[in-house]
Image (spheres, rainbow, N blue to C red):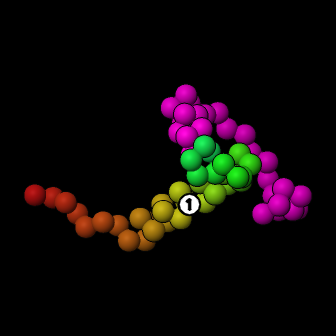
Amino acid sequence: MALSSPSAKRMTFTATPEVKALLDQAKKELFYDCTQSQMIRTLTAAGLRAWRRERENPPPSQTP
């Protein structure tokens, strides 16, 4: 989604030092050819898709 899109919304968040370190590492290793904004959009979308899959298909209960 391009930022100039009428449906795009600007968001701001504060990253803890731990999250900042993880984002820096991801930028160096995986997203070296992307902007930071593209990286964060990609990671956010992937995390939300994973969350949705977990909600739709919860793992079996691990009760002894």
Q: Is residue 43 above or below residue 13?
A: below
State the residue position of label 1. Answer: 46
What amino acid type is highlighted by mark number 1? Ala
From the viewer's perspective, is residue 45 above or below residue 10?
A: below
Q: Residue at x 56, y 30 (%)?
A: 16
Identity of the residue drawn at 53% across and 57% down: 47
Residue at 66% from the left image edge and 48% from the top image edge: 32
Q: Is residue 3 magenta?
A: yes
Query: Residue 37, position in %: x, y?
Result: 73, 48
Q: Quadrant of residue 14?
A: top right
In depth, the one of 33 and 11 nearer the eye is 33
**In this picture, which residue range is highlighted in magenta?**
1-26
Q: How many marks?
A: 1
Q: Quadrant of the C terminus?
A: bottom left
Residue 5 image position (x, y, % from top left): 87, 62
Residue 14 lies left or right of residue 12; in this view the side is left
Q: Residue at x 72, y 40 (%)?
A: 12
Observer-nearest residue: 10 or 40?
40
Q: Tell me, yes or no, if residue 43 can be seen here.
A: yes
Q: Residue furthest left?
A: 64
Q: Is residue 8 left or right of residue 51?
A: right
Q: Is 9 colored magenta in this rendering?
A: yes
Q: Residue 47 versus residue 58: which sits nearer the camera?
A: 47
Secondary structure, magenta segment, majority class: loop
Residue closest to the far bottom: 57
Residue 3 % position (x, y):
84, 56
Looking at the rendered structure, the secondary structure element under dot 1 is helix
Q: Is residue 23 above or below residue 52?
A: above
Q: Is residue 23 visible?
A: no
Q: Left or right of 34: which side holds 4?
A: right
